[in-house]
Amino acid sequence: MISAFDHFRPHHEELRKRLIRIISAVFLCTLVAYLGKDYIAAFCMQPLFTAAPELEKLVYTKLTEAFISYIKLSLLAGILFSFPYILFQMWMFISPGLLAGEKKAARLIVLWATFLFLGGACFSFFIALPKILSFFMSYAGPNLTPMPKFGLYLTFVGRMVLAFGIAFEIPFLMVMAIRTGIVAPHYFSNKRTWFYIAIMVLSFLLATGELTATVLLCLPLFLLYEAGILAGRVFKGKSKPTSSK
């Protein structure tokens, strides 16, 4: 038991060092983001004000709501700002145990996964979010005045950005599953119905039960799934899995 512990002690110390650096980076970036919280919040609220020009400000109904919302926003911004450093620390921890070919593959995976996630987040904020907000705010009228809450709006924006960031990873993960031989090239097309049901359930959960938002989330996910099927056929590997079930 003691010898085994001594064997893993260097890895434990290395992991501890990397985790401390990651937590410190997130904390410092969160602190900097909190100092500029007003600018970050204004940037996040701009799509809403563009969709509803008559809307001048948001409201909060609990004494602690604004403070907690700013803390959450700063933490999210801190994680995003420190994300490259987090990936670097993760890479420095795992790279000593990888072969040369594995290191090259891991670098490509991390690079493409990061670009796709950032692409999905940008697509959500600059393209999808304004259209969704315009649709929701179109219900306002003479007898119906919108009064969005500050905390709930930021939560909605964060959920949208995260959902689309993860969704843009779908084609990449499908191609990787096919190229590594985990599944056969025709697996995803054969199981399309089941994956569509899973996408609808996931969209419903991310939209917190809002039917319209669920539909607006489902459509791009369906398109991304079909793009993954097409990309899998184009970039399929030479090896085949032993079973396609």
Image (spheres, helix red, strand yellow):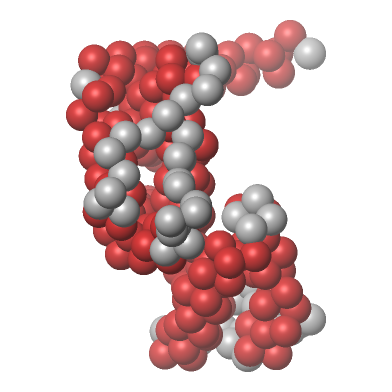
Q: Is residue 54 left or right of residue 65?
A: left
Residue 181 visible in the picture: yes
Residue 28 sits above or below residue 203 on the image: above
Residue 112 visible in the picture: no
Q: Quadrant of the C terminus?
A: bottom right
Q: Is residue 151 left or right of residue 131?
A: right
Residue 230 sits above or below residue 62 on the image: below
Q: Quick one: which residue is furthest to the top in this view?
A: 2
Q: Quadrant of residue 113?
A: bottom left
The residue lying at 25 percent from left, 35 percent from top is 42
Please name whichever residue, 51 or 119, is drawn nearer the observer in this view of the structure: 51
Q: Is residue 86 left or right of residue 219?
A: left
Q: Quadrant of residue 104?
A: bottom left
Q: Quadrant of residue 201?
A: bottom right
Residue 65 in the image: state x and y as whole percent. 50, 20
Residue 13 in the image: state x and y as whole percent. 50, 13
The residue lying at 25 percent from left, 51 percent from top is 53
Please name whichever residue, 124 or 130, is drawn nearer the observer in this view of the structure: 130
